[in-house]
Amino acid sequence: MIKIEKIEVSYQNNKIYDNFSLDLEDNKITCILGPSGCGKTTLLNVLAGIVPYKGNIINFPQTVSYIFQEERLLENLTVMQNLLYTAGKDKILQAEEILKKTEILDKKNDYPLRLSGGERQRVAIARAFLSDADVLLMDEPFSSLDTALKIKLTNVFTNLLKEGKKRTVVFVTHDVEEAMMLAHRIIVLEKGKIKDEIVPEGEIPRTYGKNTSAKKELLKVILN
Amino acid sequence: MQKVKKTLINLIFPVGVVAVVFLIWQIAAELINVTLILPTPAQALNQFLVYIKSEDFYINLGYTFLRSLYGFLLSFTIAALLTLLSVFSFARKIISSIMAVIRAIPTMSIILILVIIFSPDSAPVAVALIVICPTLYSQFCAAIDSIDKKLLEMSKIYKVGIKNKIFKLYLPNMAEGVLEGCANGISLNIKLVIAAEALALPVKSIGKMMWYTKTLLEVEKLFALTIAAVILSVLAESVVRLLKFFILRWKYDKN
């Protein structure tokens, strides 16, 4: 289990996290849900090692993979080259396999400029899953997509997660439906503090938009 | 069809502008009506045609071009090295300050001073170096600064090696800014070298030829040499822009 213990994070003289602690269960999807500006992305970036902090993070691996809100693909490299840029050039076969699973193998020699938003996000997902990292971080990866595409990519994501190696996933969103679809555990964050925790029932991915008791409970917490 | 239309428009505009310039020149020449002050375009072009049949002209043009190329390559190399050093912020502050001072010096002062210090052959190269290097340096620094910080972050998170970062992230993303700087710089470089040649008077040079024609009041020859200098400048810039297009074809590969 990864333990975040009493961390303190400041940015431009503002304290974003003060004495914040959280346990992340291995091989589960933990969703951090909260409004914009509550510190969700900062927490992810602390885990990614790009934001300084005080405190301890225990049992955290050396490498992570990350699916960003904006895909962050290198426009001067083809789809395949983008994957090999982070994974290494000896992973061509695995890269093709992942591209096949994300249904974008036919675009492997295309530049990102030629891809639609959904296709670009597939490449970003493929890049993350090509990595051997034990922890996968996701920062609102489906926020810019329409509902149909969101559901499709969520299915792609969960298939990859189930078929591939076990990974601990920390997933950040402000979208209740996304949280309900994907998370084993939902942490509601407000101003750098844990407001509540919800554990939805059922296997992931859950049906988009379905009204469950967990969802009702979650909405109550958010609206209070 | 759209591409053909766009290409035609891109060709027609510059040709049209040149035609308008020649028309204005013709009108002005006719109004002034004194060849010693302003020859007509036809007189200048006739003299240009005489030049391009002359072996001596090409030798002088070749030497001017080589001086320009040498000066530019020196400027490029030094600007690139200084940009690398500027990765360290204290070095950047010092180098930027020096470059700012150099840029503030009037170009003619630089030319006159260096013509006194250096030999006739070296002075034009030195002028190009002093004037172009700061411009290229600024352009190169701006190119590095323009690299998307989010891509750098992504590379850091995925622990991408330094070699990959340099050749697949930094250089391709800097290429546009660098090549644009080179395209503008090479054209300016040629003009500076010719200006310096006109004062330093190296044996073989377009600048010296211009100085002679000015001294002998052979104004149509001076205009013809100016046309030659413009063509050289445009050709050099075009080569760099073509290189830019090839290197950055991934940017245009949208369809």
Image: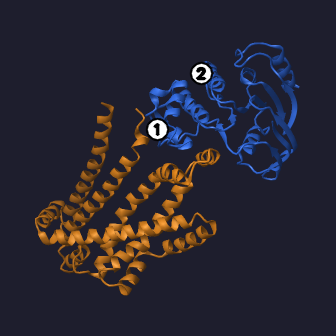
Chain colours: A blue, B orange
Residue B87 position by quadrant:
bottom right
Label 2 vs label 1, nearer the camera: 1
The answer to whether one can see residue B222 in this image is: no
Tell me the tag on residue A149.
Answer: 2
Q: Are marks 2 and 1 on the same chain?
A: yes
Chain identifier of the residue bearing label 2 in the image: A
Give x and y (percent) for residue A171.
72, 32
Q: Residue at x 26, y 65 (%)?
A: B229
Query: Which quarter of the rendering shows the N terminus of chain A?
Result: top right
Q: Residue furthest top?
A: A211
Chain identifier of the residue bearing label 1 in the image: A
To which residue does mark 1 refer? A78
The answer to whether one can see residue A111 in this image is: yes
Q: Amino acid at mark 2?
A: Leu
Give x and y (percent) for residue B64.
26, 71
Front position in the image: A49 or B68: A49
Q: Position of A77 compared to B39: left or right? A: right
State the count of labels: 2
Q: Earlier in the sequence, mark 2 or mark 1?
A: 1
